[in-house]
Every structure is written in C-alpha cells, then in structure tokens.
Image (cartoon, helix red, strand yellow):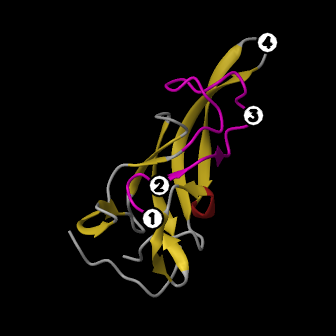
Amino acid sequence: MFGNSQMGGMNLGFPDVCLTPMPVPVPIPYPNISFGPVGFPPSFNVLWMCTPAHHLLTTPLISIGDTPGIAMGVASGMVMAPTRPVTGAFTVLVNGLPATRMTSFNIQNNTNCPGMTLVPAQIKVILLAP
C-alpha cells in the first residue's frame, strides 16, 4: 500500500459515539475524519514525493465529524481529539520506527473511534511489507 506522508491522505472512522445535547445528552454515532497533513512529528529527513514521511509516532492533531456531539465522546471524553496510528509496516523503519501506510489502523478521537487510512497521501512509494 502507499506510504503516508505530509502530502495528504485521510483517516476515516466510524462509529464515533458522542453525547449529543437534546433535553438530555443522547449517545449518537458520527463519522470521524482526520487529515494527514496536520500530523506531527513527521520524519523530516525521509522524504516521499518531496514531503516528510509518517511513522507510528506521527499523530494527526485534530479529527472532525463529531462536532454536534459537544457533550464529549462516550469512551474518550473528548471531541475533535487527535488520531493515533496503531499498525504500520513493521519491517520498513523510518527513523527507527515502523512506517505507516494506507490501510493502517488508527484510533481516532483519542480512543473513541476505530479508523483506517483510506485515502492515499502520495502515489509513488509503495510499502509491500507485512
């Protein structure tokens, strides 16, 4: 699959169950989206298509989609929280850490939502590692 970098890419997750204020807070599932270009810290000395590569410590700092649930997430107690990658190419190391790629699993909204990288960040570097 295509390696993740600062060029682009999106992580999509569902369900992001957040408490939505009605007369009383009601848990409602929302989609959750986070964007690769806001990931920090990338690998500044490994470039894929002239943009820094992502590894397991690269964390997109904000996720969106659950903003109507302003009474916070059921599992995380947060709204629009960071996304954390869980899996990557464990035999391809970028600065000593496994590289992340399209179809890598993520935990989005700070443990509230399972997700996956489904939109490629770049289209040249392919990581065919297990």
Q: Residue at x 67, y 39 (%)?
A: 66
Task: Name the kind of residue labelled 4 in the image.
Answer: Pro
Residue 84 visible within the image = yes
Instruction: Choose the circle earlier in sequence order: 1 or 4.
Output: 4
Camera-side residue of 52 and 91: 52
Say what secondary structure mark 2 lies in.
loop
Work out how far the residue at label 3 is from the one at label 1, CA to CA, in angstroms.
30 Å
Q: Is residue 34 above or below residue 51?
A: above
Q: Which residue is mark 4?
A: 23
User: In front of the other: label 3 or label 1?
Assistant: 1
Residue 120 visible within the image = no
Q: Residue at x 77, y 18 (%)?
A: 22
Q: Which residue is mark 1?
A: 54
Q: Which residue is mark 3?
A: 68
Instruction: Choose the circle earlier in sequence order: 2 or 3.
Output: 2
3 and 4 marks in contact (CB < 8 Å)? no
1 and 4 marks in contact (CB < 8 Å)? no
Instruction: Choose the circle earlier in sequence order: 3 or 1.
Output: 1
Q: Residue at x 62, y 46 (%)?
A: 63
Q: Quadrant of the N terminus?
A: bottom left
Say what secondary structure mark 4 lies in.
loop
Task: Name the kind of residue labelled 2 in the image.
Answer: Thr
Instruction: Choose the circle earlier in sequence order: 3 or 4.
Output: 4
User: In front of the other: label 2 or label 3?
Assistant: 2
**Range covered by the magenta-colored residues:** 54-82
Camera-side residue of 39 and 46: 46
Pick out the residue farthest to the top: 24
1 and 2 marks in contact (CB < 8 Å)? yes
Work out how far the residue at label 4 is from the one at label 2, CA to CA, in angstroms.
39 Å
Q: Which residue is mark 2?
A: 58
